[in-house]
Amino acid sequence: MAPGPNTPRLSSLPAVESLLIQDDTAGLIAEFGRPAVTRTIRGVLAQVRKNLLANSEAAVPDDSSLIHTVTRRLRDADAPSMRRVFNLTGTVLHTNLGRAALPEEAIEAVATAAREATNVEFDVPSGRRGDRDVHLEQLLCDLTGAEAATVVNNNAAAVLLVLNSLGNRKEAPVSRGELIEIGGSFRLPDIMARSGCRLHEVGTTNRTHLSDYADAIGPKTGLVMKVHTSNYVIEGFTAEVPEVELARLCRERGVPLVVDLGSGTLVDLESYGLPHEPTPAESIANGVDLVTFSGDKLLGGPQAGIIVGRAALVAALRRNPLKRALRVDKMTVAALAAVLRLYSNPERLAKRLPALRLLTRPLKEIHELAARMRDLVVPGLEGIASVETAHCESQPGSGALPTREIPSAGLAIRSAAQARNSGNAIERIARAFRELPIPVIGRIQNGALIFDLRCLEDEAAFVDQLPSLKIPLAKTK
Ligand SMILES: *Cc1c(COP(=O)(O)O)cnc(C)c1O
């Protein structure tokens, strides 16, 4: 490199070796290992050199400031990328934010299963190999009235396993009104194609009759499938066939009826003051042969796909090699068993199970929380934004009760007049909340940042970090 005005300043930078032997660096080497520390020092020095060349007025950092930068980079790189956030979106079971939070009982069960060896697939009395379903099957049968039950990784896997086991190289009639796509690219026709089962569309988008199914069932039919259209409703001039009637038809014609419930809560939500959502127990009572539903939607447990129904059909699912590929791990078994045990006592359930506790949280309590939080959020936004308490509408999320909103309360943050002309002021404020140590996730609606406080239970942690809020000022032209 030709000597320029900056060259002497560059040569005053320390060598990698000299930073490595400093006292402060010893602790970093012990924590992160010499290769990572060396690599990071090199990276930091390279960047400083570049800055000095580009800007003749830039100051040459001293050793302690260089080591400070190295420490910060090492810590940032070491931080887990998946971490806790505050879900103030108003969507209680938010798929992108991990759906259901687990009850303490389940968290303890997961920790135990993770820490030690367990009898996940071992029959202790006989000393022989066991089946991981035994830890869940009886609980599920008791809660749904089914003869048998099995569990896979998620409900999409449950649907795939059922279709492949009963419908490979065969046909499955499905109503045109139920050919759904739910978020995250789960499209029923696509899953069906991958399962080797041929979709036989029946009826029309808004109306399907029993005779449509009756005409469609033939020698090639492997199963009839009914899907709970979780995330939308068809209104107006509509007709769908009740499960009981369809089950009777399927029994007469000797083909199994499968219902994909999606969310599938295990309790009558109406008794908790929420709108009704179909339960697996109702489907089983209606004569449905297999029911599939999620573990981490309204059920409030870990990610899992649950299949309950006739013993002979569940046995066929277990024989399918796909079952092995889709199996749940021991931590899921532990968590799901703990959650299902909570269901044995409906009184305790609403207190212990976060999904249900949050969905049934008294409106008055949320309003009081909003008033308290407003006063604490205001100081950090002085002169930047106004903060008002607001009525809002929560939703269960994950496709459950799609058209039912639950009255809630929260904060509405609107950028102040002087900041407004920059256009994206509200996005900047939203980003500042996401940049807090525990990111706060809200939603922007009609130009306001809305924090629905239904899901804020750890008030102290939320309040503690408010002083770290830093809203960058709009760039002035
Ligand atoms: C959510 C849902 C699924 C997929 O369940 P996952 O547990 O997310 O895999 C399938 N079918 C219906 C009707 C659903 O609502």
Image (spheres, rainbow, N blue to C red):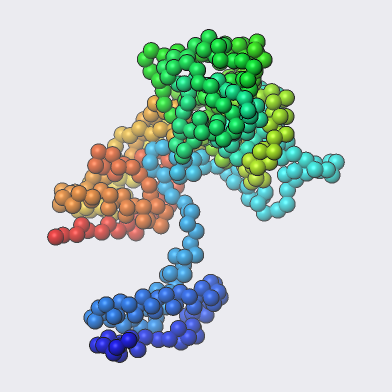
Q: Is residue 38 above or below residue 405?
A: below
> What residue is rendered at 74% in x and 39% in y?
131
Q: Position of residue 399 (x, y in %)?
A: 45, 31
Tell me if residue 144 can be seen. no
Query: For residue 41, which quarter of the picture?
Result: bottom left
Residue 142 in the figure: left or right of residue 68? right
Residue pushed farthest right? 126
- Along the line of sight, which residue is nearer the eye, 202 or 350? 202
Residue 416 in the figure: left or right of residue 104? left
> What residue is rendered at 63% in x and 38% in y?
152
- Along the line of sight, which residue is nearer the eye, 398 or 252? 252
Residue 154 in the figure: left or right of residue 231? right
Residue 124 in the figure: left or right of residue 212? right
Q: Is residue 177 above or below residue 115?
A: above
> What residue is rendered at 47% in x and 15% in y?
203
Q: How many numbered marks does the figure carry? A: 0
Query: For residue 214, which quarter of the picture?
Result: top right
